[in-house]
Amino acid sequence: MKLSNKQVTAIKRKRGELGLSITDLARQVGLSRRTIYNIFTEDDRTVNPTTYRKLSDWLIDEYATAEIKDSTAVATQDK
């Protein structure tokens, strides 16, 4: 499977928002830091299906968590 440039950009952006090092990101996702580093630096972003799933799941979880926090903040702000 191949990660698109948009997917890699989204992962990098979320990593930056959370202030994570490559090592911290690798721990959260459940991958090696070498794998994360290669995804960020290589032109060929072909990964095995398990790596693809882990990255996709992490990204979805992070954005879903952020949306829940945002909606909670708005709900409590209105009160």
Image: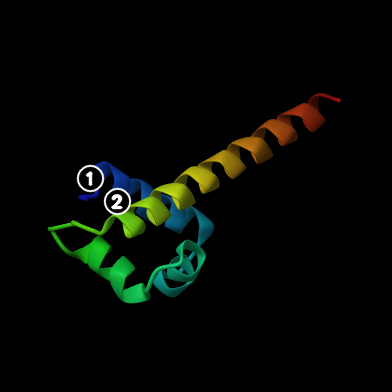
Vertical comparison of 18 with 4: above or below: below
Q: Residues within 10 Å of mark 1 (few under 14, many from 20)?
A: few
Q: Residue pushed farthest front?
A: 49
Image quarter of residue 68: top right
Which amino acid is tagged 1? Ser
Residue at the limit of the structure toward the left, as seen here: 43
Q: Position of residue 75 (x, y in %)?
A: 77, 28
- Position of residue 64 in the picture relative to residue 2 (left or right): right
Q: Are marks 2 and 1 in contact (CB under 8 Å)?
A: yes
Residue farthest along the top direction in this orientation:
78
Identify the colour scheme used: rainbow
> Residue at point 32% right, 66% down?
36
Looking at the picture, how far across and down is residue 5, in whole percent? 22, 46
Which residue in the rendered view is the most extreme toward the right?
79
State the residue in front, 55 or 63: 55
Residue at the spot 23% in from the left edge and 68% down from the top edge: 38
Q: Quadrant of the C terminus?
A: top right
Disc number for residue 4:
1
Residue 66 placement, left or right of 40 = right
Disc 2 designates what residue? 8
Amino acid at pointer 2:
Val
Q: Secondary structure at mark 2?
A: helix
Q: Quadrant of residue 23?
A: bottom left
**Residue appearing at x 18%, y 56% in the figure:** 46
For residue 26, above or below residue 11: below
